[in-house]
Amino acid sequence: MSATRVFVARLAGCIVFDPAGDRVGKVRDVLVVYRKNDPPSVVGLIVEIPGKRRVFVSINRVTSIGSGQIITTGLINVRRYEQRGGEVRVIAELLGRKVLFTDGSGEATIEDVAIKEGTEADWAVSQLFVRRPKTSASPFVKGVTNFATWAEVREKKTEGQAQSAEHLIATYSDLKPADLANTLLDLPRERMFEVAGELPDDRLADVLEEMPESDQVGILTSLGDARAADVLDQMQPDDAADLIAQLPEERGEQLLDLMEPEEAEDVRFLLSYAPDTAGGLMTTEPIIVSADATVAEGLARIRRHDLAPALGAAICVTLPPYEAPTGRFLGMVHFQRMLRYPPHERLGTLLDAGLDPVTADTSAAEVSRILASYDLVSVPVVDENYRLVGVVTIDDVLDYLLPDDWRSHDGNDDVRRRATARSELRTGSIPLPGAQRTTRGPQ
């Protein structure tokens, strides 16, 4: 095995291969255990394998670490990893911790941890890369950095003071919201709240949208009212409505009052529908244009980097006004069709004449059948006056129909169960999750 010193933060995201060169997964963290008189010993890696499952790979199974990749013996237990007492995750729990130098020269913050192989093929923490507090008031000056051995420092433990999550957040900055959500859910609960509290509002909003409702509520409750309202402002209206619906009524009203008026109005509107209807599933922020808009304008609208792919698959065409509830709904133009026409072509001439909208009280089962039957990514929702009030996207329906614990499910359902679900869906007897929920607001 390579004896090169390896910095743990650089291992995050490294590909793990088996001896044959086949990809096993990605490194998400390194596990160590403390020892009385020696530096912490490395016991293994947390590796994310296909299916978003995180498993433990013993350091004894690792034959090579270096060049941005890790080679294993190929023998991996695919049981989902659960942290045991005494185990410490370097990226999740050590980075950002405060330490004191034993020589009395002050404190510093751990920014990275170096591990190295010993003489008996065991790995241990060799050095800490730490940064001392800055001595200048200038925002452009940082504190000096040092390398320190484990014996030269001791952890600073201040009662009631949370460790900084800045370095953990930086390490996982390239993760997609769903992957970051899984990472947070794997952390101890207090650490999860701490990291969530330091995420930017828009990033935290994206992450909350990918979490189970109970964890959403827990994180939102840990935030102050003003911060919670700011995060809700950044969420999609339908996701914000689902989250507020899980809170006590008084708390929900307080947050709605603190939100931006326009955002709060959209959320209140969605809360007025039952969760098992198109109105309860829809988002009120589709792309809406006039019939005179051109293909070039339409493509420019769906090019926005912050637009969800499902919302960018089609554009809604209505009469003015162009915000939900709009003027009379005229039709939808699919992204693929726009690509077949010149930039100056008017979108009013490209409407999908075969696509009928649904009403806000259409059942979730009926919406899912429409999406499946016509290979659609989204379906428009109109009110009794044929005004567009929103769209239901395929991810809204999937999120609703899947079991509450689908994010942590291993995905090993048997064929008969899937066949039964398909049969129930076709016959309209599918047991919708909404049947077990309470209505989010007045009907």
Image: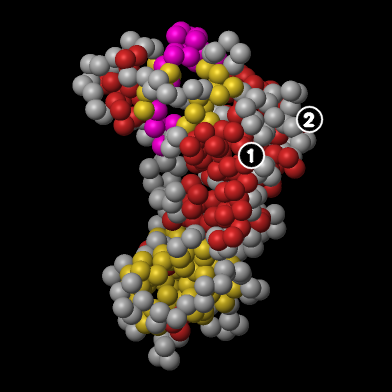
User: Residue 188, which numbered label?
Assistant: none
Residue that label 2 marks: 250
Q: Is residue 6 magenta?
A: no
Most foreground residue, 211 or 282: 282
Q: Earlier in the sequence, mark 1 or mark 2?
A: 2
Q: Residues within 10 Å of mark 2 (few under 14, many from 20)?
A: few
- State left or right for residue 126 relative to residue 217: left
Task: Please tell me which residue is depicted at 34% across the width and 84% down the height of the picture.
Answer: 1
Most foreground residue, 124 or 139: 124
In the rendering, at what x and y percent does residue 443 appear? Answer: 74, 23
Most foreground residue, 283 or 32: 283
Task: Please tell me which residue is depicted at 60% across the width and 64% down the height of the picture.
Answer: 156
Amino acid residing under circle 2: Glu
Amino acid residing under circle 1: Gly
In the rendering, at what x and y percent does residue 212 appear? Answer: 63, 48
- Helix, strand or loop for disc 2: helix
Task: Identify the magenta region.
Answer: 309-330
Residue 325, by quadrant, is top right
- State left or right for residue 146 relative to residue 260: left
Task: Please tell me which residue is depicted at 69% across the width and 24% down the height of the picture.
Answer: 272
Residue 182, by quadrant, is bottom right
- Helix, strand or loop for disc 1: loop
Q: Nearer the viewer's eye, disc 1 or disc 2?
A: 1
Q: Residues within 10 Å of mark 1 (few under 14, many from 20)?
A: some
Task: Please tell me which residue is depicted at 45% across the width and 81% down the height of the picture.
Answer: 75
In the rendering, at what x and y percent does residue 83 appear? Answer: 61, 69
Most foreground residue, 235 or 159: 235
Residue that label 1 marks: 428
- State left or right for residue 350 relative to residue 91: left
